[in-house]
Image (cartoon, grey):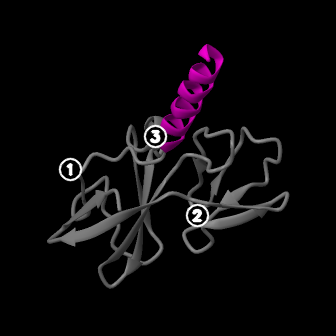
């Protein structure tokens, strides 16, 4: 009888544990992250230009804010979306690349935000942006 009670208790514990929601590790943007795009160093007036906010995002790896033109901005976490979860580098043209993954050719741009690697599709973590005057507000979705 005691073993039945233990089995029922263990089963209940498993059900309870499976219902606990895992934290999304890529949602680390404070709700008040703002970038003033009208003054240097964040002055990004042209389509395709970008600005990196250091110390934000997952593991403080940074966030890149792209100007898509006509007041449209998109922000992406600079953490590699593969299993390595390390900071990616970004060059002057806006190409983000993971230098720590086995395949160092993993790279993203503002227009190519997903890749397929060994049958798995990875996408950059995108944050919500809203232009308020000359300030872009970056938040979680």
Q: Which residues are the magenta region?
A: 1-20
Which residue is outermost to the left? 133
Choose the circle earlier in sequence order: 1 or 2.
Answer: 1
Q: Secondary structure at mark 3?
A: loop
Where is residue 77? Give x, y as percent.
48, 52
CA separation in Å, label 1 and label 2: 28 Å
Q: Residues within 10 Å of mark 1 (few under 14, many from 20)?
A: few
Residue at image location 59% in from the left, 19% down from the top? 6
Quickly name the residue at label 2: 93
In this image, 63 relative to 101: left or right?
Answer: left
Quickly name the residue at label 1: 32
Choose the circle earlier in sequence order: 1 or 3.
Answer: 3
Residue at image location 62% in from the left, 25% down from the top? 7
Where is residue 2? Give x, y as percent.
60, 14
Q: Residues within 10 Å of mark 2 (few under 14, many from 20)?
A: few
CA separation in Å, label 2 and label 3: 42 Å
């Amino acid at each position: 009888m005691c073993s039945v009670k233990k089995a029922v208790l263990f089963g209940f514990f498993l059900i309870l544990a499976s219902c606990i929601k895992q934290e999304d590790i890529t949602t680390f943007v404070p709700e008040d992250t703002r970038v003033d795009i009208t003054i240097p160093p964040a002055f990004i007036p042209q389509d395709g230009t970008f600005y990196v906010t250091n110390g934000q995002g997952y593991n403080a790896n940074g966030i890149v804010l792209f100007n898509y033109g006509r007041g449209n901005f998109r922000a992406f976490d600079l953490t590699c979306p593969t299993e390595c979860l390390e900071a990616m580098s970004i060059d002057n043209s806006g190409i983000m690349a993971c230098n720590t993954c086995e395949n160092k050719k993993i790279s993203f741009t503002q227009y190519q935000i997903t890749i397929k690697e060994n049958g798995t599709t990875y996408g950059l973590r995108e944050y919500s942006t809203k232009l308020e005057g000359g300030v872009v507000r970056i938040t979680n979705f």
